[in-house]
C-alpha cells in the first residue's frame, strides 16, 4: 500500500492524528495542561481570519459568507467572522442551528459576535448570499463527522459546491472523514484548508485543496502520551504550508 504523509516545504515530515487521537489531544490539553476550549477556539478563529486575509487581500468590496456548525469547528468560524469584521471585511454568517440551541464555547463566541453588531443571517437567504459572495468559509463539521451530512449541513454543502467562487475550510472540509478521507455523501470541495494542531489523514483527499497547518497553542508535550514526538514545528510563524507526499 502506498504511504501517504505531509511534509513542510523544507521536507520536514509532519505527524498526523486521526479523530480518536485528536479527541485525546484535546482532553489532555484541557485536563492536564489547563488550556481552555475557548482559548484554543480563539487561536483557531484568529488564525483562520489571518489566513483568509492573506489569501484574499485587502477588504475593498469583497464579500465573505461563513458557514458555521454548532460545535468547536463552528465556534472557530464564528470567531473568524468577528476578526474579519474587526478588519473591515463584509461578512455574513449562517448557522446550522438556532441561536438558542448553541452551547458552550461556540455560544460564547456567538454572543460576542452579536454584541459586535453581526447577527446570523436567515437560512432562507443562504442560496442567494452564497451565489453573490466572493468567498465561502466552511466551518460546519470539523474532525468529528459521523456518517453522511444531513439536514441544513447537507443543504449548505450542496449550495456551496454549486454556487461558490472560492472555498476555504477549517481543519478538514465538511463531509470528509478526518481519519481516513472517506466520504459517504455530500462534501465540501475546498480550494484550501487550514487544519489545526496536526494534520488529519483525511486531508490527503483532493477535496481539501491546498493544506496549511495552524498553531492553536498546544505544546508538543501534549502529544507525548500518544507516543507522538516532534520538535516545535512553526518556528517564527503561526501557519505553515504542507505538501502531500506519496511513497510506493
Image (cartoon, rainbow, N blue to C red):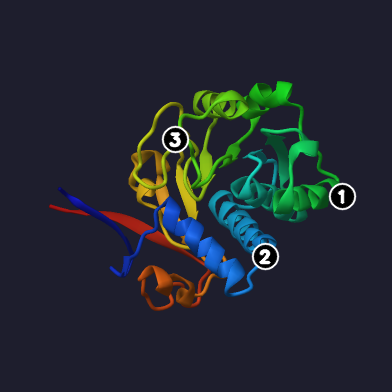
Check disc 2: other Cα within 10 Å, few if <14, some if 14-19, many if 20+: few
The local crowd at label 1, few if under 14, some if 14 to 19, many if 20 or more residues have their Cα within 10 Å, is few
Element assignment for label 2: helix
Please state which of the two labelled residues, at mark 1 or mark 2, is closer to the viewer.
2
Which residue has dot 3 on it? 189
Report which residue position mark 1 lands on.
Answer: 115
Q: Quadrant of residue 199?
A: bottom left
Q: Nearer the viewer, mark 2 or mark 3?
A: 2
- Residue 84 shows in the view: no
Q: Is residue 220 above or below residue 244?
A: below
Q: Secondary structure at mark 3?
A: loop
Where 32 sits versus 106, above or below?
Answer: below
Q: Is residue 109 left or right of residue 14?
A: right
Residue 208 in sight from this viewpoint: yes
Say which residue label 2 marks.
39
| Image location (x, y in percent) of residue 196 | 50, 58
Circle 3 residues within 10 Å: few <14, some 14–19, many ≥20: many
Q: Which mark is residue 15?
A: none
Q: Is residue 154 above or below residue 34?
A: above
103 to the left or right of 225: right
Nearer-N-terminus badge (1/2): 2
Determine the residue positioned at 65% across, 61% down.
37
Q: Residue at x 63, y 45 (%)?
A: 71
The residue that appears at 50% across and 45% down in the rendered structure is: 144
Question: For residue 242, what is the image quadrant?
Answer: bottom left
Amino acid at each position: 500500500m502506498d504511504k501517504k504523509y505531509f511534509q513542510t516545504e523544507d521536507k520536514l515530515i509532519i505527524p498526523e492524528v486521526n479523530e480518536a487521537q485528536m479527541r485525546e489531544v484535546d482532553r489532555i490539553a484541557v485536563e492536564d495542561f489547563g488550556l481552555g476550549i475557548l482559548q484554543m477556539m480563539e487561536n483557531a478563529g484568529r488564525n483562520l481570519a489571518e489566513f483568509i486575509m492573506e489569501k484574499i487581500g485587502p477588504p475593498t468590496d469583497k464579500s465573505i459568507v461563513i458557514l458555521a456548525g454548532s460545535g468547536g469547528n463552528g465556534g472557530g468560524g464564528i470567531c473568524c467572522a468577528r476578526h474579519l469584521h474587526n478588519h473591515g471585511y463584509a461578512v455574513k454568517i449562517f448557522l446550522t442551528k438556532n441561536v438558542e440551541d448553541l452551547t458552550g464555547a461556540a455560544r460564547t463566541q456567538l454572543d460576542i459576535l452579536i454584541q459586535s453588531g453581526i447577527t446570523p443571517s436567515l437560512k432562507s437567504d443562504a442560496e442567494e448570499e452564497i451565489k453573490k459572495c466572493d468567498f465561502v468559509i466552511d466551518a460546519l463539521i470539523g474532525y468529528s463527522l459521523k456518517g453522511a451530512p444531513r439536514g441544513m449541513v447537507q443543504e449548505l454543502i450542496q449550495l456551496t459546491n454549486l454556487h461558490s467562487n472560492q472555498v476555504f475550510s477549517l481543519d478538514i472540509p465538511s463531509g470528509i472523514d478526518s481519519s481516513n478521507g472517506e466520504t459517504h455523501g455530500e462534501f465540501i470541495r475546498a480550494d484550501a484548508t487550514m487544519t489545526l494542531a496536526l494534520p488529519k489523514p483525511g486531508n490527503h483527499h483532493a477535496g481539501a485543496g491546498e493544506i496549511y497547518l495552524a498553531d492553536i497553542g498546544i505544546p508538543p508535550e501534549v502529544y507525548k502520551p500518544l507516543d507522538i514526538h516532534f520538535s516545535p514545528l512553526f518556528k517564527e510563524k503561526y501557519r505553515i504550508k504542507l505538501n502531500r507526499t506519496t511513497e510506493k
